[in-house]
Image (tube, helix red, strand yellow):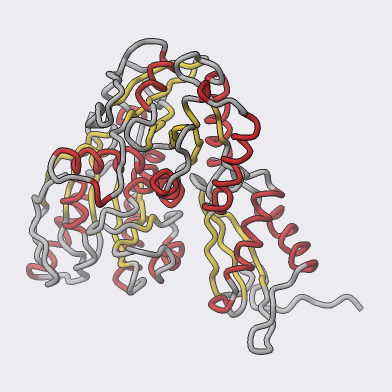
Amino acid sequence: MSLRLVIVGRPNVGKSTLFNRLAGRKLAIVHDQPGVTRDRREGHGRFGNLDLALVDTAGFETAKAGMEADMRNQTLEAVAQADICLFIIDARSGLTPLDETFATLLRKSGSKVIIAANKAEGIREWPGVLEGYALGFGEPVAVSAEHNEGMGELFDAIMERAGPEHQDNDTDEPKGEAPLRIAVVGRPNAGKSTLINALVGESRLITGPEAGVTRDSISVDWMWDGRSVRLADTAGMRKKAKVEAGLEKLSVNDSLHAIRFAEVVVVVVDALIAFDKQDLQIADLAEREGRAVVVVVTKWDLIKEKQKKLAALKTSLMYALPQMRGIPMVALSSMSGKGLDMLMPAILQVYKDWNALVKTRDLNDWLQHRVDKHPPPAVQGRRIKPRYLTQTKTRPPTFVLICSRAKHLPESYKRFIVNGLRDDFDLKATPIRLVVKQGKNPYMDGKKPKRNR
């Protein structure tokens, strides 16, 4: 059953661009001039494992007569028929009074609403992303429809709100039982397909000694210890300069798509040549996409001094990608099966950490203790005061730190906070996002706390 996703928002925020992106083809005209879309435009798209009935609407206006009023009524009619409304705001310019007016109407409609802050390419701290919290629909999703950024996070947000009748309708699984989505990625001939065959216990995928046997992403459904799992085997990802036009370029794009829609990414490296620059770039990409990551070192049966080699590989990864400190590394042989039993427990652990939620009270007790012991350095003679810390989302754990002089907080102190969260709340195996925001403690109501006399 298709999920009816209605895309709404004020004029010129990128609704039609996102509509085309989700539809997978150019169905709606896109132009910088506001008001290009007037009637509702409908189309179908495949988003991960969801079938979408997409509706693009006219830019919302407050007019009560004329064409603008007719467009407004068309939009409200579409909202009434929606399974989920995707409310688009402009990440760069921030909220406008028109956004707030439309948000009020959406709340009255009772529809499920996702805030998507569009035009957020490059960074995730644009004004609209942070201001989007104020609309009352939960965590805004930062996306760039034009540059295809943030689509994995958008998919997760839709999946969280979709009813079981819409999920995984291409499988024979019981409704509501969503499989754990795992993408297996790496350079060509690293042993990805051989690893999946070893896991599922059959020659499900074609393998061979030559690089490039796998050309597109293949999904393999599997049950592990009663848990439904969907493994995505991907084409090998070479250095950009070596990627040829045509089929190979499409294969690499398919692999990137698999990463963005996975929950856990297994980065496969060859024990004999790990870690080269391409291995590190693939691992870094998975982390930047916010996926939970496990590194698998294959062909381990060919290594003689195993303990020494494993220690060297962990040191190499830590040195090259310090943001991946704590990511599990599993050494195994797909041919002999040795070490294979360690992989799924490692995957489930990173998945658990990726979904972890820390209570706000615990975070602020921790913050006060940490700041008391190691306050931020003074900048231009003025002390920066961290005031409040809260977790705003999971998958991956994302925290907002409210402090004075937020723009001046050094990167080194941000790393100090992130590393502390990782160590003290046992979040060692997941990416962590920290957003620093200017402001006061929201529970102080503008009043200074009374000092004990």
Camera-side residue of 241 and 427: 241
> Which quadrant, please, contains the N terminus?
top left
Toward the front, the furthest residue is: 304
* Vertical position of residue 119 compared to residue 162: above or below: below
Q: Residue at x 60, y 58 (%)?
A: 390
Residue 432 in the image, given as x and y percentages of width and height: 55, 52
Outermost residue, bottom side: 381
Residue that lies at the very extreme toward the top in this rendered image: 202
Compared to residue 251, the image places residue 338 above or below, namely: above
> As drawn, which residue projects farthest toward the right?
453
Q: Is residue 406 left or right of residue 160?
A: right
Quadrant of the rendered image containing residue 179: top left
Which residue occupies the foreground of this view, 165 or 400? Answer: 400
Q: Position of residue 192 (x, y in %)?
A: 38, 27
In the image, residue 16 above or below residue 377: above
In the picture, measured across the screen, residue 377 lies left or right of residue 110, that is: right
Q: Residue 425, how many percent across, how many down? A: 68, 47
Quarter where residue 9 is shown: bottom left
